[in-house]
Image (cartoon, coloured by chain):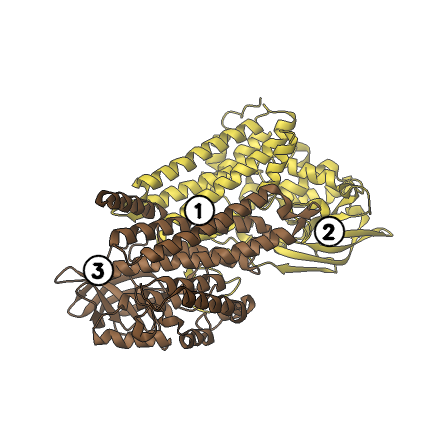
Chain colours: A yellow, B brown
Amino acid sequence: MTKLAPGFREEVRAFCAAELPSSLVHKVIHNHVLEKDDYLCYLDVLARKGWVVGHWPREHGGCGWSPLERFVFEEETTRAGAPWLIPFGVNYVGPVIYTYGSEWQKQRFLPRIRDSSEWWAQGYSEPGAGSDLAALSTRAVRDGDHYVVTGQKTWTTYVQWADWLFCLARTAQGERPQSAISFLLIDLKSPGITIRPIATMDGYHHVNDVFLDDVRVPVENLVGDEGKGWTYAKFLLANERATVSDVGHSARQLARLKGIAAQRMRSGRPLRDDAAFARRLAELELRLFVLQATCYRAVSGSMQGAALDTAASIMKLRGSELRQDIAEAAADALGLDGIVFGTANGPTKAFATPDDELVSVGPIRDYLHSRAVSIYGGSSEIQRNIVAKAVLGL
Amino acid sequence: MNAALDAETLAMLDESMVRFARTQYEFGQRRAWLGQGRGFSPERWRDYGELGWLALALPAEHGGFGDDPRATGRLMEYVGRSLALEPVFASAVQCAHLLGEGADPRTEQWRAVIASGEQILALAHAENPNDVDGSEVRTSLRNGRVTGEKRAVLHGDVADRVLVSARDADSGDVVIACVDPMAAGVAVKRLKLVDGRSAAEFCFAEAEAEAVIIAPDAASRLAHTLDYARLALCSEIYGAASALQEATLEHLKTRRQFGRPLGANQALAHRMTDLHVLREELRAVIDTAELAFDASSIERARAVSATAAHALTVARQTAHEAVQMHGGMGITDELSASHYFRRLMVCTRLIGDREWHLARFAAATSEAGDVA
């Protein structure tokens, strides 16, 4: 059982209070649209403290945080109004490279993840391979000292800002579908790559289709062994255990919801004093309490084996549901304002930026976006299947 | 109940609307309408007028069925199913019903232009967005001039006239004032709703009321209209939820994962079944409430709030489950699922707070029981 170093949580809190720019916190708390510069601003703040890759081992430039410390860092920064620490480089491909990558790959890629000079995106899902990821059909065919990659990736978050794509592709035929998959690092400036934005219902540009058409990838960009990509992908997911619950986000949104409920007047008194709404708030608070306890149990080293493996599924499942229900309650608390998504001065466009300063826009955007939380990163159905099979033997 | 509206007439109306939705309101075309002009199709609006649909909530002499809500129910089902963008609800349901059969000649001219679609009316009522029962009216009418603010007026941005609920400064009674939005003293802020339709926020500063209508019993007529509109929105939810469930079912049958259709997973089949059950129940309670509509005010309140509370459950569960079962595709702007999701969001807000409907249903039930 790991214990948190004395003063660590307080240090993170003090850091957030002193270093996070208030304008950035305002945007985050009110769910305004964030641009790449907003995320860069946060990364700069972290870099000055040496915390961009705090959970990496010291030999690779990290602080060697335990899972518990990493969890507390994520929880406290998110709760305080820090933007999402975009995980594709820092949390996903970085650890894969320092664990399985070649010396050359470590030298080439890790420093630029640490200093945020290169941004990464994840090329996993495909139109025909979502929850059933092993059904992916993007092909990488060996041609001399290159792979030639062809296929389509989808739901690729923030690839419009990225320099590199880590990508699962099929390097062989037959056998078990999982055993023919390889893990490739692809320069997004390569010829043959087309990026197409996907418009989503929250009106914000998160995700994209990425078309790969005979893209030539040097063999030195293969991570580990050919055909072992599935193993590395699973390692990556297991490494995500600490952050999947997004408990800090729920804590922040619940605080925001309580603020809304204190301001809104229903039948002459604040909404939070309405018996039915007060009960709803209490239920959400309870679920947050339960989720926090579940997360601490999972990251404090007291669990082992299958139980630990499925703890991530439980946290993802409950974390998603809680996030969604808080967002729904916040939209409900706005009453009739809960449908006002902007001021309109022209025709509706897919990417028309809603008027962020309207009180209702942020909560509505959060509610709409929250519906995706139980779909991405392993849907709730997949998480239940994992628990049913791995723990219950069903 | 209006004798003219027999089962056969209703069925014919229903059939023609379902056909119209399929042939004249294609999803891709709708997307184009949403992005141009006033955000709806002027051609379809004209069609509705010619087909007589905009008169359904008006008295018989205009070709409608008066206070009988059934024909309006079918119309709103069409609106939900097709995700219609035109101001049907604002003009031909809310305002048409509010004007009712009042003998005032000034209301006569508005009934005629509503029926033809020549002009658009909108109801400006809500002031506090968290007002649950529609009773908070602070806007005042003094010496024929209106002062106050109205929120989220659906289609208020395209309205030729706005019917404004206001309190008469002398009597304190609620009256309905008809205001030209272009008149001096009217400030309009155009809003975009989450489903892409537009609305407006009005600020009246001693704006001239062209007419003060249905003054003597305006409060009870307004209450009647709010219930009529809530029931109509239940039908819109029924139409939208039905179409969304059909699209979801199709997805479960055709999308394959792990070597079989999604629907072959029993957990998903059961969840889809639950949605279907909810929808069947909604059909039943809407039918019941429509027939109870001209009964006593207690019975009406009981039936409408029961239907509203159930419709709110149907709307939310269908919206959430449909998106979840569609997976990532469900949240894209490209597929209709996310558009139904957003329309259902708007319908639920307009119907109001579920807890309030539940409490009203319970109160009306015990009151009705006490009488019996």
The answer to whether B354 is drawn above or below residue A213 in the figure is above
| Parent chain of label 2 | A
Q: Position of residue B24 (x, y in %)?
A: 52, 71
Q: Which residue is mark 2?
A: A186
Query: Residue, x 50% and y 63% (percent of image)?
Result: A352
- Which mark identifies residue A328? 1
Look at 65% across and 28% down and name the residue there: A306
| Residue matched to label 3 | B219
- Chain to which the residue tagged by mark 1 belongs: A
* Label 3 to label 2: alpha-carbon separation: 68 Å
Q: CA distance from mark 1 to mark 2?
A: 39 Å
Q: Position of residue B186 (x, y in %)?
A: 28, 69
Left or right placement of residue A386 versus residue B230 in this view = right
> Is label 3 in contact with label 1 (beta carbons under 8 Å)?
no
Label 1: how many Cα within 10 Å (few below 14, some 14–19, many 20+): many
Q: Nearer the viewer, residue A391 or B238?
A: B238
Badge 3: few (under 14), some or many (20 or more) residues near its Cα, within 10 Å? some
Question: Given the image, on which type of amino acid does mark 2 rest?
Answer: Ile
**Disc 3 residue type?**
Ala
